[in-house]
Amino acid sequence: MRAQATDSVTVAMTVNGVSCSRTVSARTTLADFLREELELTGTKLGCEHGVCGACTVLIDGASARSCLTLAAQADGREVTTVEGLSEGRELNRLQASFRDHYGLQCGFCTAGFLVTATELLASGEAVDEARVREVLGGNLCRCTGYETIVAAVLDAADAGQGVRR
């Protein structure tokens, strides 16, 4: 049985371009806030220790493990989840590249890879295979051999989502 937190906090943030405010337990993680309070279930909970990367979101444009981040730490910040990456109902170039290169299998880890790669491509830094592998090294996938994921990111970089060396 888990101990119940008696302290609560009110958090206000912008998630995927929409302002929201909720009162939650002070110990609520950002992952639980997104999944339970906002019903944004694209952010997955895998290891809950910050190791697998499935829960990666962007906070003010920088990737963060939402399982290790308290919702209160995102107060006043801009949070982007995998649901916020698409352009309306259309896949963005990176998402389409993952589809085109079969950069996913079961899909559990895909959100974390997409969010992490989004940060890389938005950084404006030169992108090559070694850099993609380095950046994505904190995201674990048990289904693919990573080749198709790396190819998808490089293809998106070639298409103008980043700078390719």
Image (cartoon, grey):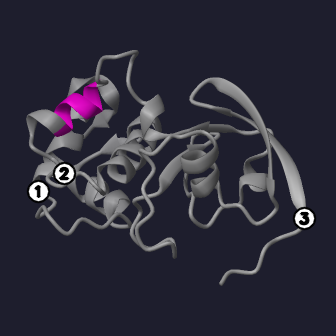
On the picture, is 4 further left or further right than 46? right
- Magenta residue span: 93-98
On the picture, is 54 further left or further right than 152? right
* Location of residue 87 in the rendering, given as x and y in whole percent from the top left corner: 39, 18
Question: Can the viewer see residue 86?
Answer: yes
Is 32 magenta? The answer is no
CA separation, marks 2 and 3?
44 Å
Q: Residues within 10 Å of mark 2 (few under 14, many from 20)?
A: many
Q: Residues within 10 Å of mark 3 (few under 14, many from 20)?
A: few
* Location of residue 95 in the rendering, given as x and y in whole percent from the top left corner: 26, 33
Question: Can the viewer see residue 155?
Answer: no
Q: What element carries label 3?
A: loop
Q: What element carries label 2?
A: helix
The label number, if any, that marks residue 7 in the structure image: 3
Residue that badge 2 annotates? 150
Q: In which quarter of the image is residue 69?
A: bottom right
Picture layout, residue 132 above or below residue 88: below
CA separation, marks 1 and 2?
5 Å
Picture layout, residue 74 above or below residue 90: below
Residue nearer the viewer, 27 or 134: 27
Magenta stretch, main secondary structure, is: helix
Q: What element carries label 1?
A: helix
Q: Which amino acid does label 3 sit on?
A: Asp
Residue that badge 1 annotates? 147
On the picture, is 132 further left or further right than 99? right
